[in-house]
Image (cartoon, rainbow, N blue to C red):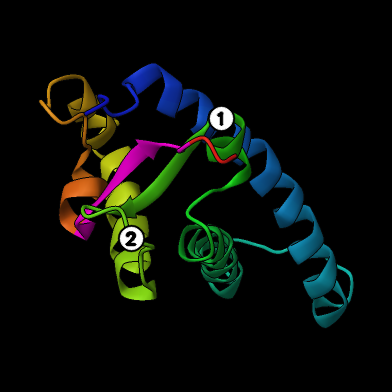
C-alpha cells in the first residue's frame, strides 16, 4: 500500500486552494455589496464574516463531496475520501471543515500532527473519518 501524501505536499495544496478561495471571496463580496449600498463591511456587521465562512465551507464541501478534489488537491494529485476510499458525504465535509479551522486556530497543531501520525492524518482527518490519498492514475 502506498503511503499517504505527506505534510509539505498537503501544505502546497492548501496554498493553491487559498489562492482560488480569495478569488471566490472577491466574487462573493461583489455579489453582496449592492445589499450594503456599495459600502465596505464594518466589524459591527457580524453577518459578513459568517457569510464568508459559509461560502468557504460550500467551496470546500462541494469539491470534497463531488470527486474529492479541490484545485490544489488535483494539482498535487491527491484526493479526500473516506477511510475505505469512497466519496465523503456533506456531514463528513462539515466536520472536516470545522476541525480544520480548529486545527489552524490551535497554531496549526492539527496539521502539524500529520508529521507525527503513522498514517499521515491530521486532526480534521481523524475527526471526520476521512483521509487524503494519492489520486489513482486513470487510464
Vertical comparison of 48 with 63: above or below: below
**Residue 129: in magenta span:** yes
- x and y, in percent, of residue 78 in the image: 46, 36
> What quarter of the picture does the C terminus occupy?
top right
| Front in this rendered view, residue 91 or 24 | 91
Q: Which image quarter: residue 120?
A: top left
Please tell me which residue is depicted at 18% across the width and 28% down the height of the picture: 113
**Which-is-in-front pick, marks 2 and 1?**
2
> What quarter of the picture does the N terminus occupy?
top left
* Magenta range: 128-136
Q: Which residue lies furthest to the bottom in this view?
A: 35
Count of numbered circles on the image = 2
Q: Is mark 1 on a helix, strand or loop?
A: helix
Please tell me which residue is depicted at 61% across the width and 68% down the height of the picture: 48
Q: Residue 15 shows which numbered tag?
A: 1
Q: First in sequence, mark 2 or 1: give its number.
A: 1
- Pointer 2: what residue? 86
Vertical comparison of 98 with 102: above or below: below
Answer yes or no: is residue 31 visible. Answer: yes
Q: Residue 131 shows which numbered tag?
A: none
Amino acid at each position: 500500500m502506498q503511503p499517504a501524501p505527506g505534510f509539505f505536499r498537503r501544505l502546497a495544496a492548501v496554498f493553491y486552494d487559498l489562492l482560488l478561495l480569495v478569488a471566490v471571496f472577491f466574487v462573493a463580496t461583489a455579489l453582496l455589496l449592492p445589499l450594503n449600498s456599495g459600502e465596505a463591511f464594518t466589524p459591527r456587521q457580524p453577518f459578513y464574516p459568517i457569510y464568508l465562512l459559509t461560502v468557504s465551507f460550500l467551496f470546500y464541501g462541494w469539491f470534497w463531496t463531488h470527486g474529492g478534489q479541490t484545485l490544489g488537491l488535483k494539482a498535487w494529485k491527491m484526493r479526500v475520501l473516506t477511510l475505505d476510499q469512497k466519496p465523503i458525504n456533506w456531514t463528513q465535509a462539515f466536520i472536516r471543515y470545522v476541525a480544520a479551522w480548529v486545527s489552524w486556530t490551535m497554531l496549526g497543531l492539527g496539521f502539524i500532527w500529520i508529521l507525527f501520525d503513522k498514517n499521515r492524518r491530521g486532526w480534521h482527518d481523524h475527526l471526520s473519518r476521512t483521509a487524503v490519498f494519492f489520486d489513482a492514475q486513470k487510464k
